[in-house]
Every structure is written in structure tokens, then in C-alpha cells.
């Protein structure tokens, strides 16, 4: 018996190291251990047993070195996810690691700060390596024979099959564990339920196996090609009957059935309110409602209080933070987990994007970004959507600081498009980017004097100072519009890409003046829709989010679009918006549902379990259909002109 244990001590030690890392991860990120820990253990141990099979094929010193390399790699994977989550409040994907190396290196100082901040975590992660190296020194690692190799492979299979069987165990949440495992679901839910190693493996599966071959629900719905009066609804004349009959791809056919059965939003008193207006749209880096102050940011305050004043607007955080935030604002679709959705949309048919709507009318379109022009593949995506695109490095001559100045971007670009009678211009700002220190943010340092006497923490002051640069940019924008006589025919839309995750919770509470109880509180933000020609402000109490921007603005501009084919709704329309977060949590005027903890808070009166389940399925279906629209280039199949 001693001899057998001696032969397997290295194997047992590596398994223990893995279990330690998974437990550390769950406690550090989710602050709890639950019954779900069986899933990362069972599926993860199956992977470890296969790695050990490979290690023992070599045996001796070579096997020891290889096993240590495997463990170091595993530790690094765990550390990357934990440190990345601590910094950005999302997990990174394999796609981002492979596609964003150069961009990650561009944040060298921030990465260094994160490492220094997490020295204790790094030490805890490397404890297993120290223990493992001590074991490797003391025990031999034998080269195994065929029979022993088969035992290890069979053991790996048994771990895996046991894990598959456990997927059938009913879960307290609405998301069935089996469906979560089989489908490309939100990464935070996969991480919480299955851990790091299994999430890593599932992401690899998505990259290798065709998206079509996943076991997703292909529910065939009863088809009803409802006739409509095009003067009453935001719906286009799409012959879904013919499309379904002629479609050979079963998934696209399923999507035709799904969208044909969606209810279009009614036109309303705000339809065409800004018809024939120019549009300036800004995705503002880490912007939020607490960046608006009558004294510090008077122009943003003016825009908010003299335009549409949204009291219950939410700006969810997505996996690829800024790029995904842009994607939601611009596309009216939810991003697909595991990829850069905006980058993946390059070359797709995108008829409802505002740039395409203006181009259909013969209006010239422009886009600008005051950081590197090719960051997140914007050299492809933004040049594809807008006819004229400039960023730092391809024509936008702003001073290369970190971050760059929004004010300078406005000053350098207004003359290029405002001389035209009609235009649509899009800006991706950067001045509000973390870190919010006087040495780590040039814009914070530049505007330090304006916040120096405020009675609040230095980090909070640094954030406000950075956002002052956006306010200066908006002041300049309004002056330029007046100079070119465009004040009375231009609509301005401003929304953030994500909440300021460079701030700690206590800073956000300090700035917002409210207690942060959950992610919805964290993501509460503001949307600015403002036209200088507006005679009076309009207060909007509707609960809504960034997914609703595209249909709302399309309706205000009087554009022809099909509201069934977008994931959000016109905020002023007849349908209640549904705020959906990356983990599948959702909120509307009836309920707030926390998917991670399977908890519902009823906002008005208690709704039935049937209604709650229906809303959950609606939110899940919207996330799923958005992923399929991207994957299938779905709009191309509709033959829209």
C-alpha cells in the first residue's frame, strides 16, 4: 500500500494544488463556497488526470519539469482572471488574450499597479507551486506502462462522466446547469458555476467547434405574419413567410420565426421629433451621472437638464468593457461572450446602425477616436461603418498623452464636418479613462485645480477632474455648432461605454450619494439626448438602458427601422424596456432579478412565478439571439435595402 501511495503522491499533490486554486478563486471573487464547487472539481480533475497521463509518458526529470510547467501555467491563468476581474470587474477571454497582447501592453503602468496591489493574492497563488516543488524533489516520477496509462485515462473519463451526470441535478436558479454548460452563456455565470479551468476549456471548445453544432434550444414557434399599418408601427415590410420557406439553414429559419413573432413598437408623439436633424453621438469613456455638476461640468449639466432628463438609465458592463459598450450603443445588440463583438461585425450587413441610416439618405458620416486609431480593431470597424474615420495615428493630430484630450479632439475635427449642410458624426472619447491619479491621468492632472478644494477623496477628485475635460469638449462643441449655424438642426446623444470601474465602491458611493447594494446600483448612469433647439426639458422616469439607445434615437429622427429586429425598445414607446446584465440578471418596472444569487426583488407589486420565468426567458433569448445575429450575419439574410 505504501508503494502504491508513493507512486501516486505527485498525482495527488497536483490535484490538491488545482483544488486549492479553484477554492481560492471562488472565495476571492464570489466570497463564498457552495455546492456548485463539485463542478469545477469533477471537470477540472478530469483535465488534470489527462495532463498527468502526458507527464508520466515522459517520466523522470523531463516529466517533473513538464508537470511544474503545467502548474505554473495553471497558476498564471487563475491569477490573470482574478487580477483582471479586480481591475475591470469582468473576466477576460482567450480571444482577448490572443488578440489584445499589444493593447494590454499599452496599459503597462495600470498592469504594474494591479500587480503591486495584489501581491498578497500572488503569494497565495504560488503557495501550491512551492509545495509541489518540494514534493518533486522528494519523490520520483515514474514513466508509466500501457496499463497504468489506461487507468489514468479511464479515471479522467470517470471524473468527466460524473460531472456530466451531476449537470442533471436541479439548480435553485432559473438557469439550468446543463444549458449553462452546453451553450455560450455569460462568462461570469460559467466562472461561478464551473470555475476557471472548465471555463478555459469551454472557451477553447467554442473556438474549435462550429457555433452551429452547439446543443442550443432551437424552439420552433407558431408563425404569424401579422399585417400592419406602416404609419402606426416601427416595422418594415419583411416577408418572413417567403424567407422561412426558402431558407436552408435551420438556425436562420429559427431566427426568422422568432423575429416574425415579436411585437413591433408603436410610433408615438416623439416619432420624427428631430427629423432631418444632424446627429452627433458620443460614447463617453467611464461617464456617469455623478460626473454631472452645475459648477464643475456646467455644459453637461445644461445638456442633461435642458434636454431629455433620464432618471432611471442603466449602463451595464460587458466582457470587453469599452468595445462591447460601444457595440451596444451603436448596434442595439448585446455582445457575444468570448469574442470582440464589434471587431467580429466587420463586413456584416448592419442596416439599422445610425451611420447606415444617414448614408441611405446621402448624408456623409464621420467617426473619431482620440486614442490609437487601431485599438480594438477600430481601424477596420469604424472605417467600415463611417465613411470618414480618424484616430491618433491615422489623421487625428492630437497630442499623445495618457489619456488624450477630448477637448483637443473636438477642436481638431469640427471644421471637417460642420461645414456641410448635413452630417452624422460619432466620437469615442478617452479623457475619462482610469487611472484617476494625478500622475496616472494627464486629464486629471490638467484639471486638478478645479477640484482641489472639494471635500472628498483624491481618487474621486481625480475622476471628476478627468470628466471636466469632456465637459470642456462639449462646451467647445456647442460653440462650434453656433459658429457654423447648426445649433437649430443638430441632435446630440451622449452615453457611457461602462461605469467607472477604476473607482472603488466607496468612491462611487461618495460621488453618487447613494449606497451601492447590487450591480444595478453600480450601473446606474445617465443618457443625454439634447438638442439646443428644444424649448423645454422632458423628464423620463422609465427604467431603461444603453440597449435602448438605437431604437429610441431612430424613432426620434423618424428613420425607417424594424423594432422587432433590435434587442432594445424605443424608451418612449408602448413596450416596457428590459434592462439585461451580462450575467443574465434583469430589471424592468416590475422586478429586479439577480441571476447569480437567484433572488428577485419586486418593485411595484409581487408578480407571479410564471411572469418572472417569462421575463427571465425573454432576457436569455435576447442575449442568445444577439449572439446569433453576429454569428450568422443575420441581417444580410433579410435582403434589406
Image: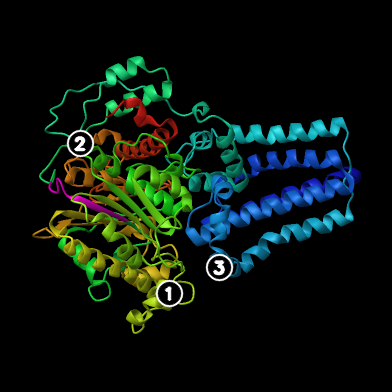
Identify the disc placed on residue 560.
2
> Residue 557, how many percent across, how many down?
18, 45
* SS assignment at label 3: helix
Location of residue 120 (image quadrant): bottom right
Identify the magenta region.
Answer: 273-282
Residue 45 shown left or right of residue 577 in the figure? right
Q: Which of the pair 539/620 is nearer the observer?
A: 539
Where, quadrant-wise, is the N terminus in this rendering? top right
Helix, strand or loop at label 2? It is loop
Instruction: Provide the residue designation for mark 1.
Output: 459
Nearer to the camera, 17 or 394? 394
Q: Give the mark nearer the N terminus: 2 vs 1.
A: 1
Quadrant housing the C terminus: top left
Q: Residue at x 84, y 34 (%)?
A: 148
What separation in Å lies between label 2 and label 1 (alpha carbons)?
45 Å
Residue 364 pos. (x, y %):
26, 46
Q: Which residue is mark 3?
A: 109
**Dot placed on the residue nearer the N-terminal end, 2 or 3:** 3
With 121 as the anchor, is 69 left or right in this view? right
Q: Compare residues 192 and 200 and report the one nearer the observer.
A: 200
Amino acid at each position: 500500500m505504501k508503494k502504491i501511495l508513493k507512486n501516486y503522491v505527485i498525482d495527488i499533490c497536483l490535484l490538491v494544488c488545482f483544488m486549492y486554486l479553484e477554492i481560492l478563486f471562488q472565495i476571492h471573487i464570489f466570497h463564498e463556497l457552495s455546492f456548485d464547487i463539485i463542478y469545477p472539481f469533477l471537470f477540472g480533475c478530469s483535465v488534470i488526470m489527462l495532463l498527468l497521463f502526458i507527464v508520466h509518458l515522459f517520466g523522470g526529470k523531463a516529466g517533473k519539469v513538464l508537470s511544474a510547467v503545467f502548474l505554473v501555467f495553471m497558476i498564471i491563468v487563475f491569477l490573470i482572471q482574478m487580477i483582471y476581474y479586480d481591475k475591470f470587474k469582468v473576466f477576460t477571454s482567450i480571444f482577448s488574450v490572443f488578440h489584445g497582447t499589444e493593447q494590454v501592453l499599452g496599459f503597462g503602468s495600470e498592469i504594474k499597479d494591479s500587480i503591486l496591489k495584489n501581491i498578497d493574492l500572488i503569494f497565495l497563488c504560488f503557495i501550491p507551486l512551492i509545495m509541489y516543488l518540494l514534493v518533486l524533489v522528494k519523490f520520483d516520477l515514474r514513466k508509466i506502462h500501457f496499463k497504468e496509462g489506461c487507468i489514468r485515462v479511464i479515471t479522467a473519463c470517470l471524473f468527466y462522466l460524473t460531472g456530466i451526470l451531476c449537470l442533471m441535478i436541479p439548480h435553485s436558479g432559473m438557469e439550468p446547469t446543463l444549458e449553462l454548460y452546453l451553450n455560450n452563456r455569460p462568462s461570469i455565470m460559467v466562472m461561478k458555476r464551473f470555475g476557471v479551468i472548465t471555463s478555459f476549456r469551454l472557451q477553447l471548445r467554442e473556438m474549435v467547434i462550429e457555433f452551429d453544432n452547439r446543443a442550443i434550444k432551437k424552439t420552433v414557434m407558431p408563425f404569424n405574419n401579422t399585417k400592419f399599418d406602416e404609419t402606426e408601427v416601427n416595422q418594415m415590410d419583411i416577408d418572413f413567410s417567403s424567407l422561412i420557406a426558402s431558407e436552408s439553414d435551420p438556425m436562420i429559419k429559427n431566427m426568422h420565426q422568432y423575429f416574425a413573432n415579436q411585437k413591433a413598437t408603436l410610433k408615438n408623439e416623439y416619432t420624427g421629433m428631430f427629423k432631418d436633424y444632424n446627429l452627433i453621438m458620443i460614447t463617453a469613456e467611464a461617464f456617469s451621472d455623478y460626473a454631472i455638476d452645475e459648477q464643475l461640468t456646467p455644459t453637461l449639466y445644461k445638456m442633461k437638464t435642458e434636454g431629455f432628463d433620464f432618471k432611471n438609465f442603466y449602463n451595464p458592463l460587458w466582457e470587453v468593457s469599452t468595445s462591447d459598450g460601444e457595440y451596444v450603443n451603436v448596434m442595439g445588440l448585446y455582445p457575444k461572450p468570448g469574442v470582440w463583438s464589434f471587431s467580429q461585425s466587420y463586413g456584416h450587413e448592419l442596416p439599422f446602425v445610425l451611420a447606415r441610416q444617414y448614408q441611405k439618405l446621402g448624408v456623409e458620416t464621420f467617426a473619431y477616436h482620440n486614442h490609437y486609431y487601431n485599438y480594438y480593431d477600430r481601424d477596420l470597424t469604424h472605417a467600415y461603418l463611417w465613411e470618414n474615420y480618424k484616430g491618433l495615428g491615422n489623421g487625428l493630430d492630437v497630442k499623445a498623452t495618457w489619456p488624450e484630450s477630448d477637448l483637443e479632439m473636438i477642436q481638431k475635427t469640427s471644421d471637417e464636418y460642420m461645414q456641410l449642410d448635413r452630417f452624422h458624426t460619432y466620437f469615442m472619447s478617452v479623457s475619462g479613462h482610469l487611472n484617476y491619479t494625478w500622475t496616472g491621468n494627464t486629464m486629471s492632472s490638467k484639471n486638478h485645480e478645479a477640484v482641489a478644494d472639494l471635500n472628498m477623496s483624491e481618487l474621486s477628485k481625480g475622476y471628476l477632474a478627468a470628466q471636466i475635460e469632456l465637459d470642456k469638449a462639449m462646451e467647445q462643441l456647442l460653440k462650434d455648432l453656433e459658429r457654423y449655424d447648426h445649433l437649430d438642426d443638430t441632435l446630440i446623444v451622449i452615453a457611457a461605454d461602462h461605469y467607472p470601474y477604476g473607482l472603488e465602491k466607496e468612491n462611487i458611493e461618495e460621488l453618487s450619494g447613494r449606497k451601492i447594494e447590487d450591480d444595478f446600483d453600480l450601473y446606474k448612469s445617465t443618457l443625454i439626448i439634447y438638442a439646443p433647439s428644444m424649448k423645454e426639458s422632458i423628464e423620463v422616469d422609465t427604467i431603461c438602458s444603453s440597449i435602448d439607445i438605437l431604437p429610441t434615437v431612430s424613432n426620434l429622427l423618424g428613420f425607417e427601422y424594424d423594432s422587432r429586429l433590435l434587442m432594445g425598445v424605443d424608451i418612449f414607446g408602448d413596450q416596457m424596456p428590459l434592462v439585461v446584465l451580462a450575467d443574465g440578471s434583469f430589471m424592468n418596472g416590475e422586478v429586479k432579478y439577480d441571476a447569480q444569487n437567484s433572488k428577485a426583488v419586486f418593485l411595484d407589486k409581487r408578480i407571479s412565478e410564471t411572469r418572472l420565468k417569462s421575463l427571465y426567458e425573454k432576457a436569455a433569448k435576447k442575449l442568445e439571439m444577439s449572439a446569433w445575429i453576429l454569428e450568422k450575419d443575420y441581417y444580410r439574410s433579410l435582403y434589406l435595402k
